[in-house]
């Protein structure tokens, strides 16, 4: 058994998993998520904002203390879309090394996709879900499309649509106008067409959705009184339910969304954009339902660190 610390720093959130890994078995010791919005403004400015770096480093200080007290054997930190795009990513890297003693790996979209697929599908072989699976990981700045079976992936593509990027680029009003929603939807449809150039989406038998936008939409569709990962994990939600939740979110004000019992405060501003990405994928690709997974790239990073 190997105890590892896995960190996933995306455009919107910074997550930590301390886990004991043995083969394909992974047991959580600590699992944390904080919204730091590292990618705030990157789409417009091309650099990481000072305030975003400060928020990220404060959370990393907390995570570093957890890691030190957990006596881990290995640490791996992966940084995704926001730090790939930023001109001042060296400043980010130096801050991480100072706190954790390891460099964050600014990985390609393709490796991000592979890690997400591994984390999401290792346990699906024991389920009644039919392969091949299309794993869709809707992040803050990008969305990964990955097709494969539990034995491995066939094809993957990362495209630049995510909940933060769509919100900052299009959904500026509260609630957004019909024209803004239509422009965001057109962006997502174009990105789906890009993904389909490399990923044979039509071969997929099961759609598996990852990350906070998906799990929040599922929690709302299930009408949970509070966010419950046990009930959300592997829940199956119809296309009609996703469409209804998306329409409700896009028509709601920030105040209304903030009052939803399952809503993380850091997702209030961007959940409409994330839901729109999921809804558009399901409509464009003809999926009748989505299976939510609470296991994702963070679990994939943990498995890779144990190797």
Image (tube, helix red, strand yellow):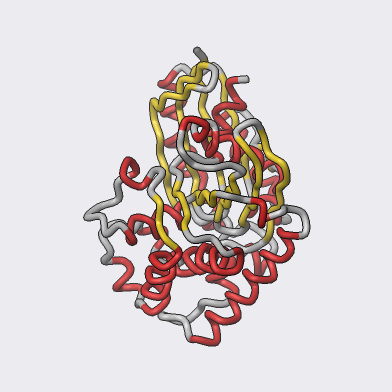
**Quadrant in the rendering for residue 96:** top right
Q: Is residue 41 above or below residue 222?
A: below
Where is residue 269 shown, x and y percent of the image? 43, 67
Q: Is residue 286 above or below residue 136?
A: below
Q: Residue furthest left?
A: 225
Q: Residue furthest right?
A: 197
Q: Where, quadrant-wise, is the C terminus in this rendering?
A: top right
**Quadrant in the rendering for residue 102:** top right
Where is residue 244 shown, x and y percent of the image? 38, 71
Q: Which residue is painted at 71% across and 66% down in the image? A: 193
**Quadrant in the rendering for residue 139:** bottom right
Q: Which residue is painted at 41% across and 68% down in the image? A: 240
Which residue is more in the foreground, 37 or 150? Answer: 150
Which residue is more in the foreground, 288 or 256? Answer: 288
Q: Which residue is painted at 68% across and 65% down in the image? A: 191
Q: Which residue is painted at 54% across and 37% down in the image? A: 121
Q: Residue furthest top?
A: 1
Which residue is more in the foreground, 180 or 151? Answer: 151
Which residue is more in the foreground, 23 or 99? Answer: 23
Q: 172 left or right of 174?
A: right
Q: 134 left or right of 266?
A: right
Where is residue 10 shown, x and y percent of the image? 57, 49
Where is residue 135 shown, x and y percent of the image? 58, 48
Q: Is residue 114 above or below residue 243?
A: above
């Amino acid at each position: 058994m190997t105890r590892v610390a896995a960190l996933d720093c995306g455009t919107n959130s910074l997550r930590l998993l301390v886990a004991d890994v043995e083969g394909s078995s992974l047991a959580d010791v600590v699992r944390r998520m904080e919204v730091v919005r590292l990618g705030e403004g990157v789409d417009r400015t091309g650099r990481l904002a000072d305030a975003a770096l400060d928020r990220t480093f404060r959370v990393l200080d907390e995570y570093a203390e957890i890691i030190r007290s957990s006596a881990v054997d290995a640490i791996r930190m992966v940084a995704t879309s926001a730090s790939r795009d930023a001109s001042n990513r060296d400043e980010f890297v130096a801050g991480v090394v100072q706190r954790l003693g390891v460099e964050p790996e600014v990985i390609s979209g393709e490796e991000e996709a592979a890690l997400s697929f591994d984390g999401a599908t290792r346990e699906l072989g024991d389920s009644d879900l039919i392969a091949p699976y299309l794993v869709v990981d809707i992040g803050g700045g990008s969305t990964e499309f990955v097709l494969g079976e539990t034995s491995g992936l066939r094809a993957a593509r990362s495209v630049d649509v995510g909940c933060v990027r769509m919100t900052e680029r299009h959904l500026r009003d509260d609630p957004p106008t019909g024209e803004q929603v239509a422009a965001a939807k057109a962006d997502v449809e174009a990105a789906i067409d890009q993904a389909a150039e490399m990923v044979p989406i039509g071969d997929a038998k099961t759609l598996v959705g990852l990350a906070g936008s998906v799990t929040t939409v599922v929690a709302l569709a299930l009408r949970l009184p509070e966010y419950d990962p046990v009930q959300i994990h592997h829940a199956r939600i119809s296309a009609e339910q996703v469409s209804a939740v998306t329409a409700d979110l896009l028509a709601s004000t920030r105040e209304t969304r903030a009052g939803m019992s399952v809503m993380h405060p850091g997702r209030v501003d961007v959940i409409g954009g994330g839901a729109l990405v999921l809804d558009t994928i399901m409509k464009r690709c003809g999926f009748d339902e989505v299976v939510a997974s609470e296991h994702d790239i963070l679990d994939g990073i943990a498995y890779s660190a144990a190797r």
